[in-house]
Image: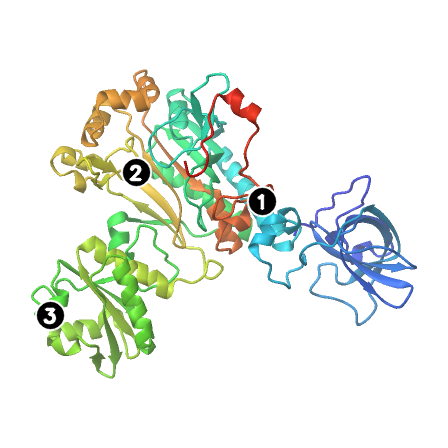
Amino acid sequence: MSKTNEATSMRDLLCASLDESHVGERLSVCGWVAKRREHGEHLAFLDIRDRSGLVQAVVAGSLDVRSEYVVRVTGTVSRRPEGTVNDRLATGRVELTDCDVVVLSLAEPPPFQLDDRTEIDEQIRLRYRFLDLRREPMQHNLRLRAVVNAALRRSMDAQGFCEVETPLLWAPTPEGAREFVVPSRLHPGEFYVLPQSPQIAKQLLMVGGFDRYYQIARCLRDEDLRADRQFEFTQLDLEASFVTQEDILGFVSNAVLDAAEAVTGVRPEAIGSMTWAQALDQYGTDKPDLRFGMVLQDLSSVFAHTEVKAFSATTVKALRVPGGASFTRSRLDQLTDQAKELGAKGLAWFRIVGDGLESPLARFLSEAETRAIATLDDASEGDLVLCVADEHQLACKVLGALRVTLGSPPVSEGPHHYVWVTEFPMFEGVDEDGNLQAAHHPFTMPHLDDLELIESDPLRVRSQAYDLVLNGWELGSGSVRIHRADIQSRIFSALGISDEVAESRFGFLLGAFKYGAPPHAGFAFGIDRLSAIFAGVENIREVIAYPKTQSGADLMTGAPKGITDRQIRDLRIRVVAKGS
């Protein structure tokens, strides 16, 4: 915690700023009573806490002060007596003596201990979030997040970006995630939406000639909540003109590495990259966790002419699990069930024992197949090999999920491994009407080498889209945008979007492009997720001051709540009863 001397008319410095250089001075601190300890009838020790930490105050005489009272303590800084030094405290070698205590505010006993010695139910923490925020972990996390924000702003400013705030009340755009809708009082029956992202607004800024824009943007999506998703989230959003994909990757890498250095004091190495196809083939996912090995291996050629029915498929992928031969049959059955839930027909497993294999399928394998499994990825005795035979993408994804289950360390452990994932597919299958679906959004520029495939073989078209991944978490995504009308028309046609529909959905963007749209590209990444990883926590609620529960409720305020009949009348809306 900071030891910055922040004197005011009420205090001379922060609690944790006291040290031996202040011995003999009479100083005032302000804060909360973290703990009171009696020492006889006429002596008490008070631990005074503010945002910087604790200092001990020795108070003579009778004093009616309880935990969480807000106090101003004036005392003489003294060295602690021999044998009472506490090296676990920043102020553990000094204390305030001969103290005068002024009670600034009374406090009822809190519903839970505010130290870190007790595990507190999260529902209670969220109901009394204003108290939870006093605890050291929340103070640390939110101040860490502030350091991240400040570093990002410095980095973007240094790279020539201009911070522009875009509207929170926006026009409905029936694309992507479900939006939060805001009824208009002045225009009855019409609605604004809260922005899922500033995507269209920032592209219009490029048409407006701003060249390089950024914003620490608040965004909202009405989607189900989970550990890494809230209704409200904050992202570093940026867009730039006259740039390539590599330029954007460079801008974002600089900002992220600047933030990492500000938090940890050490600048990470340059961020590497891999294509989406490489990530899928080697890690079974487009957000690979590179903190550990266990890279997927391909045995398709080995089993190309197999007589084992379980391996008769276009692709056979395998995963070596170090030390996995000790897994019980029950554990292996759990992994098999997980593979089937993910869509696999089954899961083949092989224990490496001695110079052979132990498995229900081992006796059916040829010598070459046995040797390939036994030597997979430098396998040795005591390892386990898992195999999935299926269509390539499914086989990879199933083993990729098992890889994470078996090998991924907690968020709080291991180094930070960043990686760029590039060349995502332009399209991802078709919808129920037989129309192609955009894998990113319909304004993503196709890979220029694949333009001729848009009509003839669209599922092979690569896009100029890219994701930034950290320790298996997708931090964010971006793309080079389409600025040419002819390419945009071909993409809309491939997606089954008519000119009329395009005009109704995106008319103000397409209309702006007619007046000279520069080549441009952008990116956005979640500050909540980045801060959570830096803080070593598994849930982004731990780095958000006032989060919602998984059901979308705010336990502290009771939101969401009903509104008054007058508000309903003013908005010209009708509330339908639950269950209607």
Of residues 521 and 457, which is closer to you in this image?
457
Q: Residues within 10 Å of mark 2 (few under 14, many from 20)?
A: many
Dot 3 amino acid type: Val
The CA distance from mark 2 to mark 3 is 40 Å
Which numbered tag is attached to residue 545? 1
- Disc 2 is placed on an element classified as loop
| Residue 371 picture quarter | bottom left
- Whether residue 131 sits left or right of residue 96 in the image: it is left
Q: Return the x and y of residue 313 as percentages of the image width and height.
A: 13, 60
Q: Name the residue under label 2.
A: 440
Dot 1 amino acid type: Ala
- Classify the position of the C terminus by image quarter: top left
- Whether residue 41 sits left or right of residue 326 in the image: it is right
Q: Is residue 160 among what the camera can see?
A: no
The CA distance from mark 1 to mark 2 is 31 Å
Which numbered tag is attached to residue 308? 3
